């Protein structure tokens, strides 16, 4: 029985065709956080231990990164990331108005994906490494396209 295959002219673009919608946004926010000299994470309080764990894990597994993590409790279910010297991000069910903010659709369940990506990139030496964050890291971020992929 013949197998239907795509012609060789079908291309793969890793930034937008990754494992699931939002994977590229998770990677972009992780890169922005690591390029920053620190981040304030504003959350509902349920992530306090996980945020402390991230800070400890980064200092253990990526000691070259000089990085500060602050935590602030809010009444919102959203998780907001205020980077010290790069654009911000948010994990939320609803997109922010500003296209300068990286949006990851979801709630606290998306935190684990982001935390793993931050540690993975930090261990690889990001942002001081060349090519360790994949090809999408060298391209400009397109928040409009990212949001279209989510909807």
Image (tube, rainbow, N blue to C red):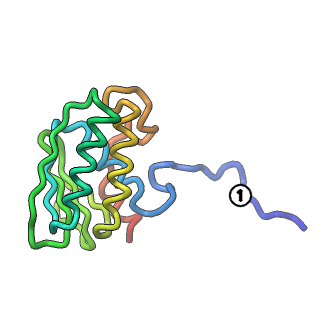
Q: In the figure, residue 120 lies in which quadrant?
A: top left
* Residue 92 picture location, percent across and down: 25, 68
Quarter of the image for residue 121 reads top left
Q: Where the C terminus falls, by quadrant? A: bottom left
Q: Estimate the x, y position of residue 80 in percent, counting from the top left.
A: 17, 59
Residue 34 to residue 106: above or below: above
- Residue at the limit of the structure toward the right, as seen here: 1
Residue at 13% from the left image edge and 72% from the top image edge: 76
Q: Secondary structure at mark 1?
A: loop
Q: Position of residue 87 (x, y in %)?
A: 18, 47
Q: Residue at x 22, y 62 (%)?
A: 47
Residue 91, percent across and down? 26, 63
Q: Is residue 127 above or below residue 95?
A: above
Identify the residue at horizontal 18%, vertical 51% (top origin). 88
Q: Residue at x 51, y 58 (%)?
A: 19
The residue wearing badge 1 is: 6
**Relative horizontal placement of residue 73, taking residue 51 as reference (left or right):** left
Q: Which residue is nearer to you in this view: 45 or 150?
A: 45
Query: Closest to the observer: 86 or 100?
Result: 86
Count of picture labels: 1
The image quadrant where one finds the N terminus is bottom right
Q: Is residue 52 above or below residue 63?
A: below
- Judge whether 76 appears above or below 53 on screen: below
Disc 1 residue crowd, few under 14, some 14–19, many 20+, Cα 10 Å: few
Quadrant housing residue 93: bottom left
* Residue nearer the viewer, 139 or 133: 133
């Amino acid at each position: 029985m013949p197998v239907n295959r795509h012609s060789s002219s079908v291309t793969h673009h890793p930034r937008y065709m990754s494992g699931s919608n939002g994977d590229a946004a998770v990677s972009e926010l992780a890169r922005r956080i690591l390029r920053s000299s620190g981040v304030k994470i504003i959350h509902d309080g349920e992530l306090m231990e996980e945020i402390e764990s991230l800070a400890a894990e980064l200092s253990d597994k990526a000691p070259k990164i000089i990085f500060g993590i602050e935590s602030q409790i809010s009444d919102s279910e959203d998780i907001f990331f205020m980077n010290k010297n790069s654009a911000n991000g948010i994990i939320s069910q609803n997109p922010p108005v500003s296209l300068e903010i990286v949006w990851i659709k979801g709630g606290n369940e998306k935190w684990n994906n982001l935390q793993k990506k931050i540690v993975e990139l930090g261990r690889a030496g990001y942002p001081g490494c060349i090519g360790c964050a994949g090809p999408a890291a060298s391209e400009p971020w397109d928040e409009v396209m990212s949001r279209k992929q989510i909807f």
